[in-house]
Image (cartoon, grey):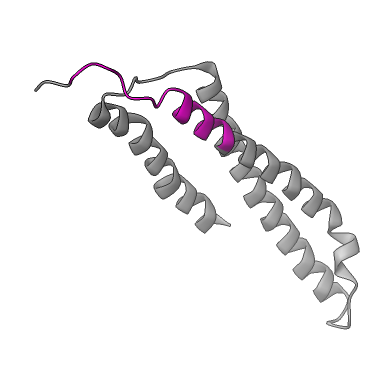
Amino acid sequence: MHGHLAFWGAYGMIVFAIISYTMPNMTGRKLFNTNTGLLAFWLSNIGMLGMTVAFGVAGVAQVYLRTKSGNRIWSGPKEIQVHFFILICCATLFTTGITLYMYEFIKYGRPSNEVLVD
């Protein structure tokens, strides 16, 4: 569970930061700071956090129920089905956030007509 959050925080968000900050500076594009961009940031992060928690809780519940049943054949998916419904909801939030991020980058990503001079 902690590995996914660390991966997302350390690598995923730094890639978005590089794209959002350095690409406009290198190509002469407009820097953008909009409400849609902030919404994209929060949706993607809340979605990732929710997916991580849903997977973690489902895993703990699965191990507990498997141990409780005495390692017999267990019909576990019915008992932990709600966690995967939450996972799908959080994955939808995450996907919406990333889609909004890409939309914003493409919308404001057109190069400006100004020539960059050092």
Residue at the bottom extreme? 72
- Image quadrant where one finds the N terminus: bottom right
Q: Nearer the viewer, residue 115 or 33?
A: 115
What residue is drawn where x is 75% and y is 42%?
89
Give the image location of residue 63, x and y in percent. Answer: 75, 70
* 98 relative to 58 in the view: left or right: left
What residue is drawn where x is 62% and y is 41%?
94
Magenta segment includes 42: no
Residue at the left extreme? 118
Give the image location of residue 54, x and y in percent. Answer: 71, 51
Give the image location of residue 16, x and y in percent. Answer: 41, 38
Is 50 situated above or below 36? below
Q: How many marks?
A: 0
Magenta segment includes 103: yes
Q: Quadrant of residue 47?
A: top right
Q: Nearer the viewer, residue 113 or 51?
A: 113
What residue is drawn where x is 28% and y is 33%?
22
What residue is drawn where x is 78% and y is 66%?
62
* 27 relative to 97 in the view: left or right: left
Is 57 situated above or below 76? above
Residue at the front extreme? 113
Q: Quadrant of residue 91?
A: top right
- Image quadrant where one finds the C terminus: top left
The range drawn in magenta is 99-115
Q: Quadrant of residue 73?
A: bottom right
* 16 relative to 18 in the view: left or right: right
